[in-house]
Image (cartoon, rainbow, N blue to C red):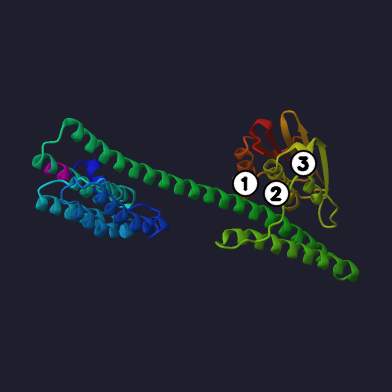
Amino acid sequence: MTSPVRALWDAPAASPAPPKRVWRDWMLLGVIPLLAVVEASVRPEVPWRWLWAAVLAVLAATVLWRRTRPLAMFATAIAIGTAVGLATGGDPQLYMTAYFLVLLYAVFRWGSGRAMIVAGALVAGGMLITFVSSSPTGADVIGGIAVAVTTGTLGVALRWRSRARVRELDQARLIEREQLARDLHDTVAHHVSAIAIQAQAGTAVAGTDPDATAEVLRTIEDEASRTLREMRAMVGVLRAGDSPELAPTPGLVALNTLAGTDAAGPTVSVHLEGDIDSVPGTVAAALFRIAQEAVTNARRHAHGATLVDVDVRVDEGGARLEVRDDGRGAASGVPGYGITGMRERAALLGGTCEAGPLPTGGWSVAAMLPRKGWTG
């Protein structure tokens, strides 16, 4: 076999698998015999019309297995139809024999590549027998070939369309899982960082200030509970069949939750400027996560930092975020998941995100999400 033919011969059946039966199959099972009997009764000029009506009534059962066994059903209908035609000395002239096209369509829509090739050969053989046993006109020949080719092409087109949609859904799921992975990393890193800092503070005052130690423990409990809630929400999304009640997507106003003074870490200051209400939810959520990750990195790695500034400015060009600290921290040679995730978030919205040391000391994370990349 040549390469294209071999590839078609080895092609698997349609994916996703078809339903075994649907309501249309039962409708066809009832309609085909009825219409065959009606046609036979109103067309007395058709030879052997009642025999053909009976054959079509029996063969109507093939529609029930046309998806699960398309080639077998099509071959059965063609074989019995051809045998009866040869025995009666003529082609069936009932219009209801056109229902064989439903079986042909099923082969190209649901069958394997091997089934398509065999079905094509059966169609060609059936046409050849018809042409030899009768004297069809050129229009009949062209019309028959055109109908068969159109039916097969329609089946293949819908098959490819279905497969393309499955690929699109798989890609969408993959992107969503990557987004959830970034959210999980950012959320857990932020809260665990806060827990670690509070634990250090608790260790420092445990022997001298029991009240401060109790306050630190309460703070750790709150952070841990919040982390568990957010993790359960994200895991619920990943589990098939779950419909968890998720918290709203964080917006720019949520940046204020990052502000505050921590006894064991730097003070975080948040400043918002411009029409923040005009920022779409996807953009606002991306800025929040980038800022959250940047603050977490500052708490972890900015040694001696006393202040972290979070500035957001919204103008006609878009939204700009800058997170600066006054600590001492060395840039890593290889970007971690946090910096990589921030850059990916910005890139998905047509923006940029850069991180690096400041000339005057400290570290800066700057993100720019242009208005042209906003999709709402």
For label 1, the residue is 341
Q: Earlier in the sequence, mark 2 or mark 3?
A: 2
Q: Nearer the viewer, mark 2 or mark 3?
A: 2
Q: Is residue 126 inside the magenta stretch?
A: yes
Q: On the image, numbered disc 2 is attached to which residue?
A: 293
Q: Is residue 20 left or right of residue 207?
A: left
Quick one: 312 or 296, which is closer to the camera? 312
For the point 12% across and 44% down, the residue is 129
Whether 139 is drawn above or below 267: the answer is above
Determine whether the residue tagged by mark 2 lies in a helix, strand or loop. Answer: helix
- Mark 2 and mark 1 residues within 8 Å of each other at the beta carbon: yes
Find residue 329 and report its horizontal and vertical position in percent. 72, 46
The residue type indicated by label 3 comes to: Arg
At label 1, which amino acid type do we have? Gly
Residue where numbered disc 3 is placed: 324
Pointer 1 with pointer 3, Cβ within 8 A: no
Q: Residue at x 70, y 49 (%)?
A: 293
> Magenta: predominant secondary structure element?
helix
* Residue in the image at 36% along x and 41% along y: 157
User: Where is residue 72, by image quadrant?
Assistant: bottom left
- Give the CA distance from mark 2 to mark 1: 9 Å
Start and end of the magenta stretch? 125-129
What amino acid does circle 2 point to? Glu
Residue 113, visible in the rendered structure: no
- Secondary element under disc 1, as helix, strand or loop, is helix
Residue 376: give x, y in percent of width and height: 67, 39
